[in-house]
Image (cartoon, grey):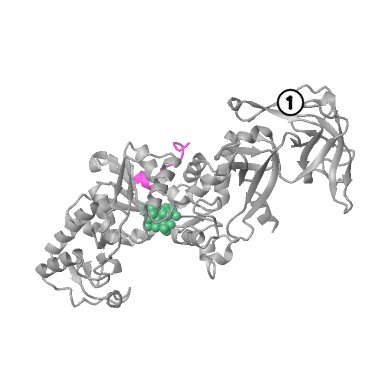
Amino acid sequence: MSEERSLNFLEEIIENDIADGKNGGRVHTRFPPEPNGYLHIGHATSICLNFGLAKKYNGKCNLRFDDTNPVTEDTEYVDSIRNDIEWLGFTWDNEFYASDYFDQMYGFALTLIEKGLAYVDDSTAEEIAAMKGSTIAPGTDSPYRNRSIEENLQLFGEMRDGKYRDGEKTLRAKIDMAHPNLLLRDPLMYRIKHEHHHRTGDKWCIYPMYDFAHGQSDSIEEITHSICTLEFIHHRPLYNWFIEQLGIFPSHQYEFARRNLTYTVMSKRKLLQLVNEKHVSGWDDPRMPTVSGMRRRGYTAEAIRQFCDTIGIAKRENIVDIGMLEFCVREHLNKIANRVMAVLDPVKLVITNYPEGQEDIFIADNNPEDASAGTREIPFSREVWIEREDFMEVAAKKYFRLAPGNKVRLKNAYIVECTGCAKDDAGNITEVHCIYLPESKSGSDTSGLTVKGTIHWVSIPHAKTAEVRMYDRLFKVEDPANEEGDFKDHINPDSMHILPEVYIEPALAAAQPGDRVQFMRKGYFCVDTDSTPEHLVFNRTATLKDAWAKEVKRG
Ligand code: ATP
Ligand code: MG
């Protein structure tokens, strides 16, 4: 499929580089997450892109943890990231940590100091900001800018040795305080942080800044195509400056547009707030746009990869309709999910002419889309659960389900004719009555009848109970991060609705967490990780059709 589409701009660049024999025709990418949160669907697009390009051009892709900020990083995040990438179906050629390069980076910093291209600055963060200038005014040189090389070497060594407090000194590149690109006005290279690092422990109390660490890590790994998101486009000259001054492997940075999705937020900082303030149950809450949340919700890796492939990459930021992702999920689940019957809002149907104590066992295909999915047994008896909405005492126009005098087929079983219902004192319908036509048995129907409605059901004595969690969008507005006020003001208060007791076919009794099924006529569901054999729990993965789009159209 991907063979048919035209090349995207990165593929064009790579094919030109290969044709020119650049880097000996070698393609080496990397995915560089900062382990300060769980991966989300935006990261998934970057993963598909980086690993996909490596695969397409017989290259390699590294997983590199960009762990240069000890304060926010954690091994829990490292483990989740590794797990999510594997689950998405990708294997990295090498696993690296930017923190593994701290010694080399320190050496690079010494080289720049020795070349007179870096200096230790005693100015405070506020003073540095004030001396920065603006887009229309040049900056001012720091009073420490012309320290001697010897003094800089000594002070930088003392910074590393822990002689100074956080913020007391920084190491800055000596470039040009009047440079039109503000990022090149003597950017910070190192800051002091007396913090424990998840890998290097207490070995370091100075940590490199992103701009100094990232390109150097790419270069150490001899990355040929370093792909990042658009907000780093102005960092590229700095990326190149460090590499040129150090004379190290010339990695090259390319930018593509960040992917955002409607009705959700995508920054780890915001997602962390949702977790910490308990708007969701955790990073893997099925409503979260995280890879782990989507997995728990029942999305497949194939569907997510298909989505990333479909939206492709762009050079300008845009927001993708979440309906597109859901479409990919439905398409894949339609192929792989077994069909089963579950009654979510039950009312009893009594088949008055079916003998008490008798039962039928029907054999049904698990998936009409997939013959290899096999068959299962469905028990039938005199009393079955049906959906409350499948009965009307007075049939509305074009209502082809149960109503007195109407005939419907009970899926995989018999045609029944509705004869009425029973009510309690308050007028609530307590049971629906019907008679069945024995000659209409599915598979050997000799009744000659065709009926307009087919409904699902579950035999009452055989039914298992389960909890079902119905999900809706986490936010009420398309782009909560860009609305007025706090993004959390736009949380959808009805994003989860629990059905504590629904009835499911006995064949589902052994369902395991992660199993995906289609509840006929109701949607796609997945067994939740909270599920136990004694208490089955299902998540609604997706409706069968896009109920939201209909709602929006209706207005
Ligand atoms: P966030 O803003 O969610 O914290 P980030 O960019 O800080 O994201 P990183 O861990 O640094 O997160 O990202 C790892 C890689 O994933 C980077 O190369 C980044 O460009 C890419 N990435 C992150 N978010 C998106 C997104 N929404 N769309 C595409 N790529 C993304
Ligand atoms: Mg980042």
Image position of 257 with respect to 460: above or below: below
225 relative to 174, above or below: above
Q: As shown in the figure, which amino acid type bears the numbered disc 1?
A: Ile
- Identified at 58% across, 34% down, the residue is 335
Estimate the x, y position of residue 122 in percent, counting from the top left: 21, 74
Please tell me which residue is depicted at 24% across the width and 40% down the height of the picture: 21
Label 1 Cα neighbours within 10 Å, binned few <14 / some 14-19 / many ≥20: few
**Location of residue 179 (image quadrant):** bottom left
Q: Which residues are magenta?
A: 1-12
Q: Characterize the magenta stretch by its predominant secondary structure.
A: loop
Toward the viewer: 72 or 243?
72
Which quadrant of the figure has residue 12?
top left
Asked if residue 362 lies in the magenta stretch, the reply is no
x, y percentage for residue 380?
76, 30
Q: Residue at x 28, y 46 (%)?
A: 224
Relative to 519, does residue 547 appear above or below in the rendering? below
Query: According to the image, label 1 marks what residue?
Result: 361
